[in-house]
Every structure is written in C-alpha cells, then in structure tokens.
Image: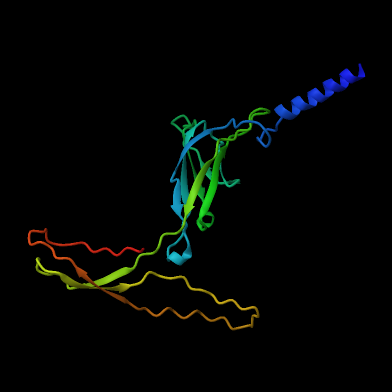
C-alpha cells in the first residue's frame, strides 16, 4: 500500500511539472495573446552620427489580430510606448498597433525581437504573441556632393571629356586614445578645412537622334 501511494505521488508531480506554468509563459505554456503577421518597416539601416544625419525615433507598425486596448509592444524584452488605434466606439481595432522605438536602439547593426503582450487573465492565459525579428542593417555609405559639371553642354555625335567637381562624403572623426591622460583646458575642436574633389571621365558618344539632356549620378560603392 505504501508503494502505491508513493507511485501516485510521483505521477502527480510529473503531471504538474509537464502541464503547470505561470501566467507569463516562462515554462511550457503556448502563447495566448495576439498573432503578429508582419512589421512595417521590417528593416532599416543603422543610424550613426558618422553619417552626418540626425538619428530619429522610429514609428513601428505591427499588423496582425487579437490586439486589445492595453496591448504593449516589447523590443528585446523592453516595453515601448504603444498606441492602439480605436474605432468610433472606442474599441480597439484589433488588427494593428504602433510603437515608438527610441533612436538609441537603432544605432548598431543586428536584429531585435519584437512581440506584444496583452493583459494576462489568469492561469492558462499569458497574453504573449508570437515573435517577429526586426533587422538593423549596416549603415549605408554616404554620397558625395556635386557642385559643378564642365562642360554643361556639347554637340551630339562625339565622345565628351567631362569634369565633375564636388565634395567627398563626410567621414567620422577619430579620437586618439592614450593610456595616460593629462589635464588640458577645454577648447573647441578646430573646424575641418573644406576641400573638393575633381573627377575626369570620358562619356561615350551620344547619337545625334538622342533626346537632349542627360542625368549625372555619383553613387558610393
């Protein structure tokens, strides 16, 4: 009899260990919240000050179904400021939410895990959605600036030597690092001296019947 009670206790513990979980899905419980289908945008280039651009917060749109008024978007486990669109009665539309991703979270290439959380309503309902991966790509190469093109016109039917003058894209300043630091007076950094670049190329011959005008583009490699 004693052995049978022991066997029943072991079986009960095993059953609880397999089926039990908390309201937040930290064990074996399936997600019971909203269902995410896609993000908009789903990827962007990393924003760095070296590009000379001002990094701004990103408004991320999550599409799916099952969103409620108190749905919260999480980015790598951190809650974001979330907006839930409503209809004329004040009820959640249920198929879309938006969230603001701070610019500080978008400066490094990599991936981020995005999900939503609906309020848990007791055991068996953790309110978690499925996850979608957001991609932060390497920052794009900055483009040079064209100030003038010479000559600006030519007769068709002959090869054209072309000179393009402009400025190179901004490059990041590098700070020298020293093992030993000496106290110095605070002085503003000297401005970078402006300089220009000049490219020479030979444009192929245009037929006499070609439409007037041509577009010149410089693209970073």
Of all residues, the one furthest to the right in this rendering is: 2
Residue sitting at 72 percent across and 28 percent down? 18
Q: Quadrant of the C terminus?
A: bottom left
Image spot of residue 5 (x, y percent): 87, 19
Does 151 sit above or below residue 140?
below
Task: Report if residue 169 is visible in the image.
Answer: yes
Residue sitting at 67 percent across and 28 percent down? 122
- Quarter of the image for residue 158 reads bottom left
Q: Nearer the viewer, residue 39 or 135?
A: 135
Task: Report if residue 152 is visible in the image.
Answer: no
Q: Quadrant of the N terminus?
A: top right
Of all residues, the one furthest to the top in this rendering is: 1
Image spot of residue 127 (x, y percent): 60, 33
* 99 to the left or right of 165: right
Residue sitting at 32 percent across and 69 percent down? 145
* 93 to the left or right of 80: left
Image spot of residue 199 (x, y percent): 27, 73
Residue sitting at 60 percent across and 83 percent down? 184
Does 121 sit above or below residue 155?
above
């Amino acid at each position: 009899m004693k052995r049978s009670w022991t066997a029943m206790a072991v079986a009960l513990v095993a059953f609880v260990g397999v089926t039990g979980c908390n309201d937040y899905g930290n064990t074996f419980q399936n997600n019971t919240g909203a269902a995410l289908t896609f993000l908009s945008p789903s990827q962007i280039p990393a924003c760095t000050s070296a590009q000379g651009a001002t990094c701004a917060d990103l408004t991320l749109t999550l599409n799916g179904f099952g969103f409620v008024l108190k749905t919260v978007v999480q980015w790598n486990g951190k809650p974001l400021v979330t907006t839930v669109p409503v209809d004329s009665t004040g009820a959640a539309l249920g198929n879309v939410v938006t969230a603001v991703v701070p610019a500080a979270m978008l400066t490094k290439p990599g991936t981020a895990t995005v999900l939503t959380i609906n309020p848990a309503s007791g055991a068996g309902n953790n309110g978690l959605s499925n996850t979608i991966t957001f991609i932060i790509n390497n920052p794009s190469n900055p483009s040079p600036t064209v100030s003038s093109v010479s000559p600006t016109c030519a007769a068709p039917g002959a090869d054209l030597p072309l000179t393009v003058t402009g400025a190179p894209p901004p490059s990041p300043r590098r700070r020298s690092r020293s093992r030993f630091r000496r106290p110095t007076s605070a002085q503003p950094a000297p401005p970078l001296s402006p300089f220009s670049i000049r490219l020479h190329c030979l444009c192929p011959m245009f037929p006499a019947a070609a439409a007037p005008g041509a577009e010149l583009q410089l693209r970073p490699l």
